[in-house]
Image: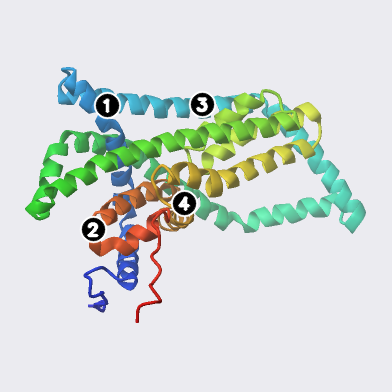
Amino acid sequence: MIKFPKIQSSSGKFSALEILQYIVLICFILYFGKTLFIPLSFSLLISFILFPICKWMENKGINKIGAISISILLITSLFGFIVYLLFIQINAFTSEWDLFSKKVMETWNQVSISIAERFDITTEEQTAFFKNYINNSGKEAFSLLRSSLYSISESLFFLLIIPVLSALILYYRHLLVKVLYLIFPADKKETIYEILVETIHAYYNFVKGMLLVYLLVGLLNSIGLLIIGVPHPFMFGFIASILTFIPFVGIIISALLPIAVSWITFNSIWYPIAVIVVFVIVQALEAYIIFPFAVGRRLKINALVIIIIITLGGILWGAAGMILFVPFASIAKLIADRSSRLKTLSVLLGEGDEEIKQPDKTQP
């Protein structure tokens, strides 16, 4: 068994090395337990968001089961609306598929002729090369299909289990809080209560920050498409913004229709390329500037740590980690702020508002 060295200051605080060791151990556990922790974390996030709604309905006389059912139905309807927008995009794109496929063939013929003239490679040789490449890449395609089917089945499992876990967490919330009180010393009961209340408040701020992110991303998408001249820029821009809730897949699907429309409308390859450039730039701004500042400030975590946490979440849990690790960090900061032993972690996650005391050089 590996024993970490006890490196602790005389004041009783955890040293930076100890904190790093615990972070590595937690990351190890989170990586290998992600099949359990990802749906459980989403369920916890949803239960924190829905708790004020459930509490309000219970105070109005609705029983606990009814309040939880209505809350879960609301969040499920919202997700269903997002999926509906996704299918609208797909249907609209399929209606333009004939024109789109003709444009693809015309462009391919032009590229093929250009390659034949410039590099002295006939179109028959190009076709034979691509056929050979496709035949040789059959194994890779099968492996990709298998991994895609596994990802789809895993996502369906998450979609089914997350609402169930959220409802159970809301139903047994008093039991879970009681367990927390029993785990920690009796004199920490008030501190635990404060952390729970502020955690719910932090998640509420997180949701408000995300709404601001979607608004800004929608505006930037729309302005970029408007400058290019794509028809219905605000519709495309805000649909793309909403669909970014579905990591990676959402932005790809939302970009297909404006790309196709711009290609068909202007009969030039440069307009679709310009649309792709707009979406890439806006996504980069959202990931590294808008999200850290809009969400990080509401959670009182500095932008540098937010970017590192997003990257770490992507490494450990993929797209889910990029969403979940930021509110996790806010909970860690709430705990660190109330523990003298975690002062180092509190300062690291904070915004640096505390004034650093310089040593008095006049004293020996």
Dot 4 crowding, Cα within 10 Å, few <14, some 14–19, many 20+: few
Asked which secondary structure carries label 2, the reply is loop
Question: Which of 209 and 121 lies nearest the eye of the viewer?
Answer: 209
Q: Nearer the viewer, mark 1 or mark 2?
A: 2
State the image coordinates of residue 268 (x, y, percent, origin top left): 81, 35
| Sequence order check, earlier mark of 1 and 4 | 1
The amino acid type of the residue labelled 2 equals Ser
Tag on residue 339? 2
* Amino acid type for the residue under numbered disc 3: Leu
The colour scheme of the drawn protein is rainbow
Q: Which residue is mark 1?
A: 53
Res 286 visible: yes
Work out how far the residue at label 1 is from the one at label 2, CA to CA, in angstroms: 31 Å
Q: Residues within 10 Å of mark 1 (few under 14, many from 20)?
A: some
In contact (CB < 8 Å): disc 4 and disc 3: no
Q: Residues within 10 Å of mark 2 (few under 14, many from 20)?
A: some
Whether residue 138 sits left or right of residue 334 in the image: it is right
